[in-house]
Every structure is written in C-alpha cells, then in structure tokens.
Amino acid sequence: EKGSSASSNIPKDKLLAGLLDAGFDEGSCLSRYQAVLYRKESPHLPSPYLLERLRKHEALQKKCGPNTELYNKAVEQLKSGQTIESTECNYVVWISYSGLGNRILTLASAFLYSLLTNRVLLIDRGADLADLFCEPFPETSWLLPLDFPVNQFNSFDIKAPQSYGNMLEKKVISNSVDGASMGSLPAYAYLHLAHDYGDFDKLFFCEDDQRVLQKIPWLVLRSDNYFVPSLFLIPTYEEELSQLFPKKDTVFHHLGRYLFHPTNRVWGLITRYYQSYLSKAKERVGIQIRVFDTGIGPFQHVLDQILGCSLKEKLLPGINAQDSVVSTSDVTSKAVIVTSLHSGYFEKIRNMYWEHPTITGEIVGVYQPSHEGYQQTEKQMHNMKAWAEMYLLSLTDELVTSAWSTFGYVAQGLGGLKPWIMFKPENQTAPDPPCRRVMSMEPCFHAPPFYDCKAKRGVDTGALVPHVKHCEDMSWGLKLV
Ligand code: GDP
C-alpha cells in the first residue's frame, strides 16, 4: 500500500537512501521528508560516490554562499572586472527563463554542471522560484542576493557581448590550447545555452572550451534545455560522470529528487488532491496532455490518440457500449489524473466512463486538477498549480505523456516512470502507433550540438556512445539511456 495518510512519525526511509541530508528543519519544508509517504520506493539507489559528492557540494555551498566572507570577496572581484588570482569560490548563476518544466530541467542541468566543476550554484529567483521550491542545501541559500552587481539578465541573449560565444567570435578571448588567453579573461562570462544558440555558444560542449571556462570565476547561464546528455560527451567529465552515475539513465531521477522539494503551499495542493482523489484507488494512471498545435481544441484526433494509446496498452479498460450492467465493485479500481490546459479531453474521458460500464467491471474515476487555459508563467498560483500537477503525475503507477513536453519529462523523472509517450500528430491525424514506451525515464535534450570538437566538423552526436541516443519523440534530440 502506498502512503495514503501522512502521519508525523515517518517509518520509511525519509532520506531516500541517503540522497537527502538529515539536518533540515522539518516544518519549514514538509515535502522534503514526507515525499516518501506518497512515492513508491525507488528501485534506483544513488551511488555512494554521488552521496559523497553531494555532501561535499553542500559544504561548498555553505562555505561560499551568500553572506559569507568568501562570497563578498568574490563579488568584490566581480565588480572590479578582472580575474586576479584563482579563487577559492567559483560560481554558476542560473537565470530563470521559460516555462516551469523547462526551468526544472535546466536547473538540474546547471546543478550537475556545478557539481562537475566545483562551482557554487546560485539562482535568479525570478518572480516565483522561492514560492515553488524549498532550499535544497542545508544552512545556506541558493537564491542569488537581490543586490548582485550583474543584473541586466534581460539583456543576456544570443547577441550579448558578454557571452562566451560572442567573446570567442570577436576574439576577446581565445580557446586555443596554448593558453594564450591567460591573464586577459573577464571576471564573468554569460553562457547562452538557449534553444536559439549559435555555433560559437555550442563550443561550451568542447573540452578545450571547458578548460578556458574553468578559469572564469563567475558563469551566468541561461538555458531552456536539459543539456545533460551533451555533458556526457565531453571527455573532461567522462570519468567523474560514470562514477557519479553508474546507471546513466538515473541522472534526473536522482538530481530531481535531491533538488526539487515543493514549498508548504504547493505541498498542500499536492497532498490535498492526492488524498481526495487518488489515494484510495488500487491503481493510479496519469495522462499528461500538451497540444502544440494552434487552436484550442479539443481535437478529435488528439482524443483518438489518447484513447488509442491507453486502451491498446491496457492502461484503461474498454467500455461496453451496449450493456447497461451495473458493476459489482465498490472501490475505484483506477483513478485517472488528467493534466491539460483545457478541460475538453478530460470531460470526454470522464463521460465515457460515466455513461458506460467497463468490460472488466472496474470502476474508473477521472479527475483533472486545473484547466488554466493558456500558459501564464508570470502568475504565482498558476505556476504553483503547474508544479503540483507535475508532482501528482509523478505519483502515478502508469503514465502517458505528450511528445516534446518538458512538463511530462519532469513527472516521469521524479516518479522513476517510463511513460508511454504519444507521438506528435502531423496533419491533424492521430499517428499510428499512437504511442510507445520510452527507452529510459531521462528527459530529452531538444537542441543538442552536432559537432565533433576534435575533428572540427559536424557529427551525429546521437551515434557516438551507446548511452546517448536520439529521443523517441524528437528525432534530433538526445537522451541518456
Ligand atoms: P512544456 O512547454 O510542455 O515543455 O512545459 P513547460 O512547463 O516548460 O511550459 C508549459 C507551461 O504551460 C507550464 O509551466 C504551465 O505554466 C502551463 N501548462 C502546460 N500544461 C499544463 C497543465 O497540464 N497544467 C497546468 N497547470 N499548467 C500547464
């Protein structure tokens, strides 16, 4: 039985096999230690080396975090504009950008990069980050102080002269191996890793460029992509990554569970919903619907695809259209949680199981927490609901997701689930087959580079090593398997 009631004495492994530090105040972030009551135990154990590195990283975040002498010193150096000597504390500043699913994935990517490069991770809180997530590191804060001297984040885009790519292109700095650039490096560089990035920006994923970046104390990063798969292709980090993640398809699963703890307000949304509609069912099925077509729908071809997938893969029972037999079961066998910006698909599925009995006699309850209409990333409650829904999807037993959607990737990764992913419809028709089971629970990197750093020419980066493959839902994307 999965936890249906949250009691205060927690018998299960609330530290998730050592992933979490025991030293946090419980009341200020209930989800951190209560998550275990709602989740199935993960079959994926974090490696002892990952645990060791996380504890070391926590010590670094505390030593160099905001309001420490070392932080103040590093900021003074940043203001002076020059890298003077090698510093004890180096930083990655993550800029809040794009939809919530994208942000969660880039934040996990930035954290892994910080771990690999021994940098402190600080986050631009944007409008709402502090309302969504608890602090992940003990006795310090990951929120970038509001008086941080570099604050023109809005002007950091593909054209920004401070970007690493543009500095390379304009020969302000050099990535040549002889180190000719030493002494003239700036105090910070902006890393433009968003979907529209250019060839020079993409050199971030090359070994020689990583060597240059190591000497720059402050890196300010903007991305809307899960760029982890390409970190696995940089020789510099190969050894370390294989020690951290002996099973390569667990990166987001572990880092996500480590980093992302809903705040008490969001935890209230999650637990109240779970207890009201999901906890009593024998089985929970999640259906995440994200339609990238123009127009609002509901579209018949999308409904056909959802039902086609769910019935074919036996996630939902078929209905008996003729018979009006009353089921003898008195328990909800299946609770289905639908997430979508619109209510149309949910209403059709719910009515189907109201108007007809199932052929198996099972009782199917269909629920949808919200239908927000359209993406409203600047609104606090909107994002809280989005986060709560991703989390609720992650608590299901079987999951159906939509192609291209980071919203679904977050749910599958946190839940340790391999969903059935619905292919993107073309020409207003449901694809055949409508869906397939994914190879791994890892998110897809939608905009990877295709460049061989050594040979200096294009290459299929999805064909270089067995653990980095093209994604099921996007042929040019890359994912860890
Ligand atoms: P993606 O665009 O599907 O990759 O996911 P993102 O999370 O990055 O951006 C989509 C945004 O639209 C979400 O963050 C929400 O703000 C909103 N959104 C999309 N689908 C849903 C949904 O099913 N429920 C809720 N509450 N919001 C959604």
Image: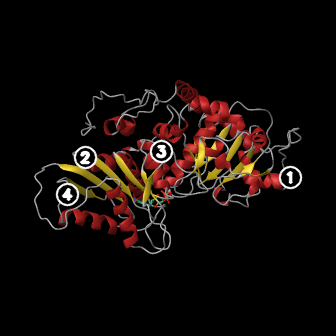
The amino acid beneath tag 1 is Lys
The residue under label 1 is: 171
Estimate the spatial distance between the alpha carbons at disc 4 and disc 1, rounded to whole Å.
69 Å
The total number of labels drawn is 4
Three-letter amino acid code of the residue under disc 2 = Gln
* Mark 2 to mark 1 CA distance (whole Å): 59 Å
Say which residue label 2 marks: 275
Q: Is residue 368 above or below residue 410?
A: below
| Residue placed under numbered mark 4 in the picture | 359
Residue picked out by circle 3:
441
Report the quarter where the N terminus lies: top left
Among numbered discs 4 and 3, the one appearing first in the sequence: 4
- The three-letter code of the residue at mark 4 reads Ile
Q: Is residue 295 above or below residue 123?
A: below
Cα distance in 3D space between marks 1 and 3: 41 Å
- For the residues labelled 2 and 3, the Cα–Cα distance comes to 26 Å
The numbered mark, 2 or 3, whose residue comes first in the sequence reads 2
Q: Which mark is residue 132?
A: none
Label 2: which secondary element: helix
- Which kind of residue does numbered mark 3 sit on? Met
Give the structural element (helix, strand or loop) at label 4: loop
Q: Secondary structure at mark 1?
A: loop
Helix, strand or loop at mark 3? loop
Please tell me which of labels 2 and 1 falls first in the chain. 1
